[in-house]
Amino acid sequence: MATERPSPEISVVVPCWRSETTIGRCIAALRDQQGAPPFEVVVVDSSPDEGTVLAARAANPPGPRELDLVLERAADRLFPGEARNRGAALARAPWLLFLDSDCVASSDLLATAARLRGSGPAVLGGSIALPGGAPASARVRHLLEFKESLPGVPARDTWQIPSACMLVERAVFDLHGGFPATRASEDWLFDWEVWTAGHAMRFEPSLRIAHLTPAGWAPMARYLRVLGRASGAARRRGGLPGQAIVRHPWLAAGLPIARTVRAIAWCARHSPRDFAFLLVAWPAYLAMASVWAAGFRRGLVEGGPRPLAPADGRA
């Protein structure tokens, strides 16, 4: 007779799309949690085939460490925010921990989340590391996306919490209607709405994950064009900081240099290893920031990416 599982205190929600190469490591890391409260994992997959679901099942065989795992298959391709919202609707816990399918949790992630919940902030974001040995293209891409969430960055109040590792009080998530249905930048739009409503939000580096950032310059350029365009559209749509550039899109021409200088200064303060890397790799960073900025300006002028625009295989 199967033992009834206790009610989860935290629901881990993982959106997937063609994640068969990474979901196994994501699930395995959640099976290896130490000192965790009762939790469940809700995987929402909208891939065109069953490869991701099969890989998730294979990573969670029966046994003493078997996860309380819910696998939801969507008939149609979902945007990342839509997939997270679907998972939240299925989740049973009062706290939601959103993880990307290419993220590997530290062994104390759930224990740390349990310790921090109820400490004041309604939304907490974790540190996002890049595994060692990553090639230069992956390092540039990781810094472009996650430099403000690097492990060496100190705890701080902030509205910019990436959904790659986001702990949210369920009541606040429901109050604001979850993530908007955009191709990207759905986390910035959600964050800004929560922040401007007066809820406390905090970056906590003790919440730790590693992000399996993919390598390759051409895939990065395609992804950054989509990301930049969505970011520009989000600025216009959501009233995010930087409204001067919404009124004067020509200012976007200066964004690549501004982003590169800021990245170097930021890493000099918080990540000496990445600072040393950028002293050599800044031309590549500047080039990729220029690709992002071109998409950003297009988003300011024309709106966001076309529905279901392909980017890179992640949700």
Image: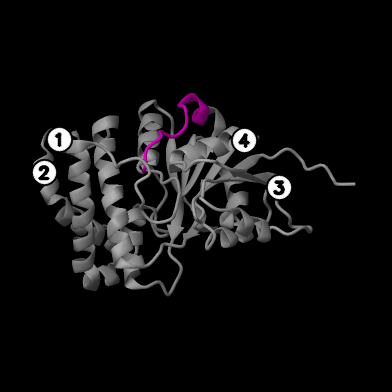
Q: CA distance from mark 4 to mark 1?
A: 40 Å
Residue 269 appears in view = no
What element does badge 2 sit on? helix
Sequence-wise first label, 3 or 4? 3
Residue lying farthest to the right in this orientation: 1
Residue under circle 1? 244
Q: Is residue 32 visible?
A: yes
Of 215 and 193, the residue lying toward us: 215
Q: Which residues are magenta?
A: 172-183
Mark 4 packing: few (<14 Cα in 10 Å), some, or many (20+)?
Answer: some
Numbered mark located on residue 293 in the image:
none
Cα–Cα gap, marks 3 and 4: 13 Å
Sequence-first tag of 4 and 2: 4
Residue drawn at x 62%, y 36% is 91
Amino acid type shown at disc 3 = Asp
Which residue lies under the disc numbered 2?
251
Q: Residue at x 61, y 43 (%)?
A: 72
* Disc marking residue 68: 3
Dominant secondary structure, magenta: loop
Report the Cα–Cα distance between label 2 and label 1: 8 Å
Q: CA distance from mark 3 to mark 1?
A: 48 Å
Amino acid at pointer 2: Leu
